Amino acid sequence: MSSHPQSAAHGQPMVHEHIVPVSTYLAVFITLLIATGLTTWVAFQDLGNWNVVVALVIAVCKASLVVLFFMHAKYNKGLSRIVLVGAVFWLGIMITFTLADELTRHWQISPQPWAGAIIPVIHRLLF
Amino acid sequence: MSTTATVESLPNSSAEPQVNYLNARYGVKSWLLTLDHKRIGLLYLCTITFMFVVGGIAATMMRLNLLEPQGALVEPETYNKLFSTHGIVMVFFFLVPSIPATLGNFLIPLMIGARDVAFPRLNLLSWYIFVTGCLVMLYVVCTGGVDTGWTFYPPYSSAYAHTDVFLAAMAIFIAGFSSILTGMNFVVTIHKMRAPGMTWFRLPLFIWSLYATSVIFVLGTPVIAITLLLLGVERLLHAGIFDPALGGDPLLFQHMFWFYSHPAVYIMILPSMGVISELITAFSRKRIFGYSFVAFSSLAIAVISFLVWGHHMFVSGQGVYAGLVFSVLSFLVAIPSAVKVFNWTATLYKGSISYEAPMLYALGFIGLFTIGGLTGLFLASLSTDVHLNGTYFVVAHFHYVMVGGAVMAFMGGIHFWWPKITGRLYPDLWARFAALVIFVGFNLTFFPQFVLGYLGMPRRYAMYPAEFQALNVLSSAGASVLAVGYVIPLVYLIWSLKYGQVVGPNPFGAKGLEWTTQSPPLTENYVKTPIVTEEAYAYENAPEPEVARV
């Protein structure tokens, strides 16, 4: 239940916001620029099966920095964290069920070689 | 009585012209720069009504073309553009924002006892973003259209695209941000701005349903936005994302598209269910049967809706095992949906039922949505879907849910809250007549399509075998009746703005905070912040209706 029902409409802060120093923002920004450069450099390297893995690891690190610092997830509690966890969980749903298709797409049921040999035997036994 | 303090402090609403949100300020600027949630709701209402007319014109031309087996009106290429325009406009520019952005915007603060939504400026921005998306889409329609269908499936939208797919996708991309902002605004408003005493379990069920809808807005819309952006990136930069020739996977598009677009079905139907809960209780003058079950079924539908998208892909080449899982999960949605239908029916039992126009729409909704929902189970079954997929059976099924469900509830809601919005009543006889015409026209249009689909007529074809003509003529005739049914309310609602009977705060004797303030409400909604002391739908304490019951 809201204890200050009208305050948000007037732009009054509901809770005390954590003030992040500009230096932190600058540090995160520079780290993101470096990581972007790293992404570009890695894209031109042939790491075989690790190409996607490495690119995704860098991307997840960059996204985490944005969420933690620029979106203040590091300093927020309660409902904001639930929203964050919910969003990540929902992303997980999308990836998991998409992979459920991608990884099983070729598992079509088809007669196996051993079945061709065993079915006449069973037929003889029964009939 | 929960909110007597507010009611008693108001002047007699019908005695003399009073200051309200409509006459507090005048001029175009006062509307275009308004931060009042009620005015923004009306801006949305005008915008989506215009888009509904655009989508309706496309549908009319399609039905006219299908009067003859060889096509009576347009070339097949034009027909492709017509069904694409109809689908895109109706889904993304009418149905998705219909109830949330109009009635939701107007009613949420009123229903929870707040002065406005949490972020009024963001609310206005969301309308401007939506209008921008509409204008981009209209530009596409006027400059050649798009022929991919509303689903934008590759390769229609990639390798074989020869229309302005990118711009059409961008129109939806832009409109999507409007949905995200609206959803976020509603979630924060419902969490933070409820009046004292308005606990979660005293909230009207309309609010619960819009809360669930807003969660889908926030979680799902970014996915469709990024999917359409990736489509644009592939077309412009030739990056291999969905095109197999470039190393992409076309089914990846379908996964990402339906991850949003199936929950989007519930964006359209959940608010409708909220409206129906309000109408059924008001016109049977009875508490809702099983409040908490109806409330939590909205959340259950919202969650499960994200787990079922693969039933759109049973015959697309999706893995068999994924198909099995999606089929089982799809059946689960029927449970919370059935909870609602049974609870509405139980609410009617021994109620003091009257048949005003909003109630006729509500009763129509229950029947039509049930048919739409149950035929969905046919399509969720792997084996029957192989026969029915891509046929008119699917078209009939989703129109029973989207039009028979969502649009019927939208019409019912508009009629129910129209006296609150405008302070005037429409001619009830005409309204009941229009509801009947819409019900008959709708069934005449779409029931034959179930039969056509079962017989094997595929959707999205400009021509068909001659043996299907009788049913197609029946369907087109029904569409004409349906169109008349939609024009009648448009005429008498506009007429009522000037000539309608002036009514007081609560013409239907309904429960709910919004009925305790004057009609039309003040810009600030309430003279004093209401204090809520009882649960919703306590109809044993309801005031008598101002208008005669029928």
Image (cartoon, rainbow, N blue to C red):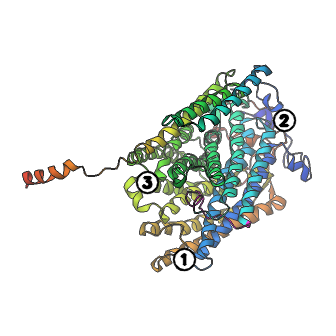
In this view, the residue in front, A94 or B488, is: A94
Residue range highlighted in magenta: B142-159
| Total residue callouts | 3
Residue B429 in sight in this render: no
Which chain's residue wears label 2? Answer: B
Which chain's residue wears label 1? Answer: B
Q: Are marks 1 and 3 on the same chain?
A: yes
Q: Position of residue B60 (x, y in %)?
A: 64, 71
The type of residue carrying mark 1 is: Val
If the image is split into quadrants, where does the N terminus of chain B sit? top right
Res. B212 image quadrant: top right
**Residue at mark 3:** B317
Q: Are marks 3 and 2 on the same chain?
A: yes
Say which of marks 1 and 3 sits in front: 3
Cα gap from disc 3 to disc 2, whole angstroms: 60 Å
Q: Tell me the SS state at disc 2.
A: loop
**Residue at mark 2:** B527
Q: Tell me the SS state at disc 3.
A: loop
The type of residue carrying mark 2 is: Val
| Residue B270 covered by magenta stretch | no
Residue displayed at 86% across by 50% down: B32
Q: Is residue B238 left or right of residue B426?
A: left
Name, please, the residue furthest toward the front. Answer: A45
Q: Is residue B285 above or below residue A74?
A: below
Q: Are marks 1 and 2 on the same chain?
A: yes
**Residue at mark 1:** B473
Residue A63 in sight in this render: yes
Q: Position of residue B250 (x, y in %)?
A: 52, 53
